[in-house]
Amino acid sequence: MLVVLGVFFLLPIAAMIEFATRGVGIDAPRTLTSFTSILSSPDLTGAIVASLELAAITSVAMLAILLPTMIWTRIRVPRMVRVIEVLCLAPLTIPAIVLVVGLAPLYQWININISDSILTLAFAYVILVLPYAYRALDAGLSGVDIRTLSEAARSLGAGWATVMWRVIVPNMSSAVLNACLLSVAVVLGEFTIANLLNFENLQVAIALIGRANAGVSIAVAVASLMFVFVLLLALSFIARGGARRRGAHGVVA
Amino acid sequence: MTAVASPTAGSAGRPRAGSLRFPFAWLGTVPFLGYVSLFLLLPTAIVVAGAFAGARGPSLANISALTQPYIVDSFVHSVVLSAASAAIGAVVGAILAYVLATGNREGAVRRVVTAACGVLSQFGGVTLAFAFIATIGGAGFVTLWLQQHGINIYANGVWLYQLSGLILVYTYFEIPLMVIVFLPALDGIRPQWREATANLGGSSWHYWRHVAGPLLFPSFLGCLLLLFANAFSAYATAAALINQGGIIVPLQISNALSSEVGLAQADVASALALAMVLIVVVVTVLYSTLQRRTARWLP
Amino acid sequence: MAAFAVITACGSASAAGNSGGVDAATATSASAFGGMSGLIAAAKKEGQLNVIALPPDWANYGSIISGFTAKYGIKVNSANPNGSSQDEVNAVRAQSGTSRAPDVLDIGMAVALANTSLFAPYEVSEWNDVPASQKAANGLWYQDYGGYMSIGYDSSKFTITSVQDLLKPQFKGAVALNGDPTKANAALNGVMMASLANGGSLDNIAAGVAFFHKLNQLGNFVPIQATTATVKNGTTPVVFDWDYLSAAHGKDVPSWKVFVPPDAVLGGYYAQAISKTAPDPAAARLWEEYLYSTVGQNLWLQGGARPVEMAAMTTAGTLNQTYAAALPPVGGTPVFMSPTQATAAATYLNSNWAQAIGS
């Protein structure tokens, strides 16, 4: 099963690599110039750095806003759980090209009065990652008996911060990690909002290069896929190490 | 996860004077609600206001523009596309997630596949479309290889550039998305449950039908809904593959916003977006009802 | 919406650049700056230029932009490369007041005529070299370059001598348009060219729609977006596109040829305009001076487009003869759609295109 799926997923990537290594003309030899010329594109490095910063800011902000709210509502305000769930799904119901129409006046105000930096995109990106992050965190929370754990911790004298950070979160570490992975992937793959607000993030830079040279743009796309893949893999190692230190593996019985 | 409010499950904490307890609890949701109101509800309100805007004040002209046959057709296509790719993605993704969850949690296979799914779930747009074109398009290397072996997959027309092709391309990011969002739910399955079922004389079928299945089903439904909404509002991939005729609603919206031949009507785009929101609301309500029924017995 | 209006009002007040006593935002020619050197100094002080929807492979804009930066040291921020003309004016409205709003626009005539309230009047130094019928008398817009609608094709696979050749079986799954005609100017002209070649006229695009309907039924027409990648890859070996855009594919596919049907020579020009609320007004005006100088016009010629000053430059002998000789051969009399005819064609397409290509 894994093999069949693996073939399905790897074939298009192989096709991209095949295209990116083509020379000019029918019988031209294979060449790696498309890949090597990535390094000489100045705009690209700026765009990569900006996208990485946005990914980090968005993940942290998403966890800061969403996770305490989810835990809190499940314990103290159960009626709001459904409301939060619907609100978190809402960003996906509107296509990004229309959401930009509504975001544009807001961003106009922000860019004139607060800051013109590309990092202001984080405000919108946190909203964009909500559906995915919510679903990942929710699946993790469903496996943890929050009420019992929090009652136990509170009766032992813990404050709410301790309950959340040192009792509940270690029990859902894979969900938190997945939420972060998804946020990073969403931010690094986002194109429409950045493009229509005239910001240049990674995907916009790829599109621009694509109009100059088809081979280079596909090479950049493959390179960015590999780059995000390695990044996510590294993240998974870091988080696993942390979880093991706290000794979390299943419910703290 | 699905908390059916019971009278005794009020708050877990030190009791406070009655009148102070209620506002304090709700205050905890203010940061989230405030942020979402500003950056999601406000833009949505602006878009909805546009849907009812007319030349001389509020009007229903944009809404009535939605009743034209080619727009209704595009809504039908959108729903079919999203439902099909979500269903396939959910089932295949759930199976793949199960394979991963039953394996070694710290192992290399799980790490690699999870990271790959994270990347591929957001891989879309022009590049994904081109990747498929380069693989099984008219001049794709798989197509040519099959032709050399006597198999012509496009004998009845190039289906890649039609709705069926789009469904296939959409599953490319729907399956990894399902794996990512469903895996934590599968991680929550305790081996003790399997042992308990076996101890009570139950088979694998009993385990899935009466123990793990019902516990996982609400989460599965939630993920399915996410996949549907994800496919429903996706735009860039379809724009590269089926650029002609506005076959699905996001393409119609793009036409209404960006047409440079004089057919741009930003307010019709808002009306189309409003209709999309309503459709997803309807689907969410269905999901909610279904979930409440199946999760009724959960604590 | 009221908040939006307030913000726009505040934004335009602060966008008026002030450089040494000259209000660049209201300057209508280089003389307002005391000559070109004053304009160059003012533009360098601003230090950047925001352009939009200028992909590097469109009429040689890649070289034009890098040439401008090399000559004046002004950084050019190129946004939304795949945007349409409508996206450009949408961005001018939505981002006015921010530092990223577009300064200059390169748009199709339909969008230009509908949005003149967004433009600032300006007359470049070579104003008299632009024919009177190709500019607005009040200086709000001025045409820049144009070309003829053509069929680009891979000559190692096909030979095309007329538009009707495309109905033959060897073109199965091969023909594409550059965009959707209800959305993109280039595609609209493609269908109109097919109409002219099949007995239609500038007032009647129905013959073109019927032609594409037949192409689609035969399986010769593919609905994908033709890009440099799909051309290089061989998925779209036949593309209806402006001749200068088609010519750019020659660097990826050496056997690429451009065919302009002698019985259907349909031309089209694009237009330049400066945004009234440009965040870098002096740089915007310098950009226009650069584009309409001999250097800029010849760079467009190098990209296969016909610059608007071509007649004047031929007389003055400043036209680059090598590039001019490389232009695709055009027989027959060129015709151009008027704005009314373009609107009528668009309206017809809106009601009939989707059914014609049977999605």
Image (spheres, coloured by chain):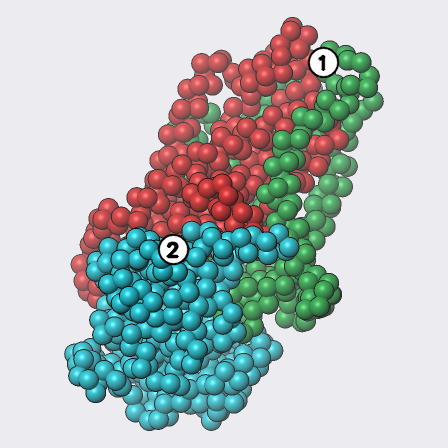
Chain colours: A red, B green, C cyan
Residue position for label 1: B13
Residue B149 visible (yes or no) = no
Mark 1 residue type: Gly
Q: Residue at x 27, y 67 (%)?
A: C35
The correct choice, above or below, for B44 with respect to C265 in the image is above
Q: Residue C270 carries which label?
A: none
Q: Residue at x 63, y 70 (%)?
A: B70
Alpha-carbon distance for marks 2 and 1? Answer: 63 Å
Residue C140 placement: quadrant: bottom left
Circle 1 crowding by C-alpha within 10 Å: few under 14, some 14–19, many from 20: some
Q: Which of B78 and C279 is in front in this view?
A: C279
Q: Are marks 2 and 1 on the same chain?
A: no
Q: Which chain carries label 1?
A: B
Q: Which mark is residue C18?
A: 2
Q: Which residue is drawn at 40% across and 36% down?
A: A53
Instruction: Mark 2 and mark 1 in contact? Answer it, CB < 8 Å.
Output: no
Residue A113 visible (yes or no) = yes
Q: Helix, strand, or loop for circle 1?
A: loop
Q: Which quadrant would the C terminus of chain C be assigned to in this image?
A: bottom right
Q: Helix, strand, or loop for circle 2?
A: strand
Residue A56 shown left or right of residue A23 in the figure = right
The correct choice, above or below, for B122 with respect to C239 in the image is above
